[in-house]
Amino acid sequence: MRIGVVTRAHGLRGAVIVRADDPASVTAQTVREIYLRQGASVSPYAVQQATPQGRGKVRLALDGVDSREKADALRDAIVLVAESDLPPPAANEFYAYRAIGCSVVTVEGRLLGAVTEVFATGANDVLVVQDGTGEILVPVTAEVIKRLDFAAGRITIAPVPGLLD
């Protein structure tokens, strides 16, 4: 699962700065192994040390990355972790990546499309649902989301007035 991106090298000994996708997340500070994706290539790295830098950034010292040149080569790499390394979501929460690709249907059974993206607005997250001709922005609230069935790849909603107009 993606948790952030390498933004730059830090110092002369090969540390990198990672900007977390979720600034409140401490995942990069707690895992022992990360994976860096550069293009089609994904490589594992043991985390030697993780130091918070504030505002959603973490300084990581990685096994095998021992020079500024090696760290510079990792700039813009996508930081991934194994799903098993993530804490379980709290009640009424889910990891956004699990919604991607799910079909969205109304409580009456009308297929609206598939989730292509999830983004945060501050008040709540929003599902971007593509139906082939356009998109519908579905707020992730208890009023709208009625059932999340990730095993079946299906999200059931009760549209609020104006949502589907």
Image (cartoon, rainbow, N blue to C red):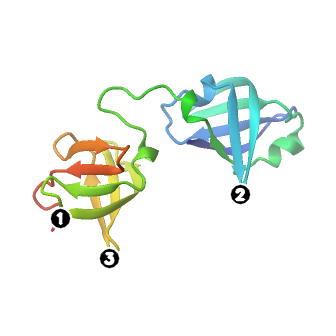
The kind of residue tagged 3 is Thr
Mark 1 or mark 2, which has the lower sequence index?
A: 2
Asked if the residue under mark 2 is in contact with the one under mark 3, i.e. CB atoms within 8 Å, the reply is no
Label 1, label 2: how far apart the Cα atoms are: 38 Å
Could you tell me which residue is drawn at 35 percent across and 61 percent down?
114
For the N terminus, give its image quadrant. top right
Could you tell me which residue is drawn at 17 percent across and 58 percent down?
109
The x and y percentages for residue 92 are 29, 32
Dot 1 corresponds to which residue? 164
The x and y percentages for residue 47 are 73, 27
Mark 1 or mark 3, which has the lower sequence index?
A: 3
Could you tell me which residue is drawn at 55 percent across and 30 percent down?
84
Disc 3 is placed on an element classified as loop
Q: Is residue 51 left or right of residue 99?
A: right
Q: Is residue 22 left or right of residue 40?
A: left
The kind of residue tagged 2 is Ala
The image quadrant that residue 112 belongs to is: bottom left
Label 3, label 2: how far apart the Cα atoms are: 30 Å
Dot 2 corresponds to which residue? 40
Dot 3 corresponds to which residue? 133
